[in-house]
Amino acid sequence: MGRAVTGAADPVVLYVSGGNTQVIAYAERRYRIFGETLDIAVGNCLDRFARTLAISNDPAPGYNIELLARAAVARPERSGGRPPRLLDLPYAVKGMDCSFSGILSAADLLAAQMREQDAAIARGEHVDDDDRITPEDLCFSLQETVYAMLVEITERAMAHVGSNQVLIVGGVGCNERLQEMMGQMAKERGGNVYATDERFCIDNGIMIAHAGLLAFETGFTTPLEDSTCTQRFRTDEVYVKWRD
């Protein structure tokens, strides 16, 4: 679906959602996985941290984290406040793979420190502004860390396959900061980044219909009575007959 919408020819694909985090590229009728999460998906990490901060699900927790991160960046201009504070979080890249559970745990601990600071201020105690942790700083730090990890493993895959195109798909692919960071990396390599908006990034019927149409046009059919749902169908298990 991403290739059809953006016109990307043969990109390295960063597939990031609540259930998946993979760097993949097409070769010999299959999408090969070059790197992936070793535990939870990046979207799951963001959604769970949104619950830690009691961030609204409307319209989506990841989007509201993005808005808070933007507010941290805009704070100096908007109110004359301090620049965004990049808090120390684990940077867990292991070869071509990455891990997000430790980052989530560390972010949860920082959120607990923030609540302790808020309680101290409510008691009339002084907390130095340079030490103050805010929700905006937490969201900014989480985004910068996890997206830097994703850019790193994607760049390695690009170098490995000799591609100068990146296509970002999945619900997290809507994030403009991720697109910006990936675009900067691709530009430095003389390449391009391709991404779609929320109509095609988040779960939608058209991507399922499009995949079904491609399969049908290449002769793949399944009688309704034989149809099943496989929830743990890995990307590289799908035989892609509709691509050369």
Image (tube, grey):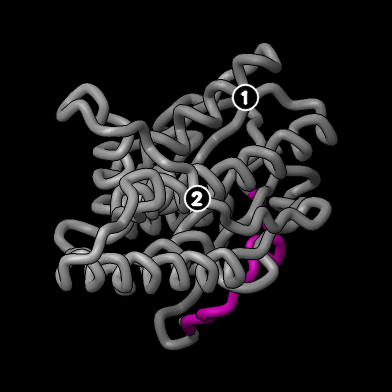
Type of the residue with mark 1 = Met
Quarter that holds the C terminus: top right
Q: CA distance from mark 2 to mark 1?
A: 23 Å
- At horizontal 71% and vertical 61% (from top left) the residue drawn is 236
Q: Is residue 81 magenta?
A: no
- Which secondary structure lies at badge 1? helix
Type of the residue with mark 2 = Leu
Q: Residues within 10 Å of mark 2 (few under 14, many from 20)?
A: some
Depicted 93 relative to depicted 113: above or below = above
Depicted 207 relative to depicted 192: above or below = below
Quarter that holds the N terminus: top left
In terms of secondary structure, what is the magenta stretch mainly? loop
Q: State the residue in front, 32 or 28.
A: 32
| Outermost residue to the front | 125
Q: Give residue 123's position: percent from left, percent from top.
A: 17, 72
Whether the residues at callouts 2 and 1 have beta carbons within 8 Å, the answer is no
Q: Which residues are magenta?
A: 228-241
Q: Earlier in the sequence, mark 2 or mark 1?
A: 2
- Residue 51's image quarter? bottom left
Say which residue label 1 marks.
185
Say which residue label 2 marks.
87
Position of 105 with respect to 67 (left or right) is right
Q: Give residue 41's position: percent from left, percent from top.
A: 54, 65
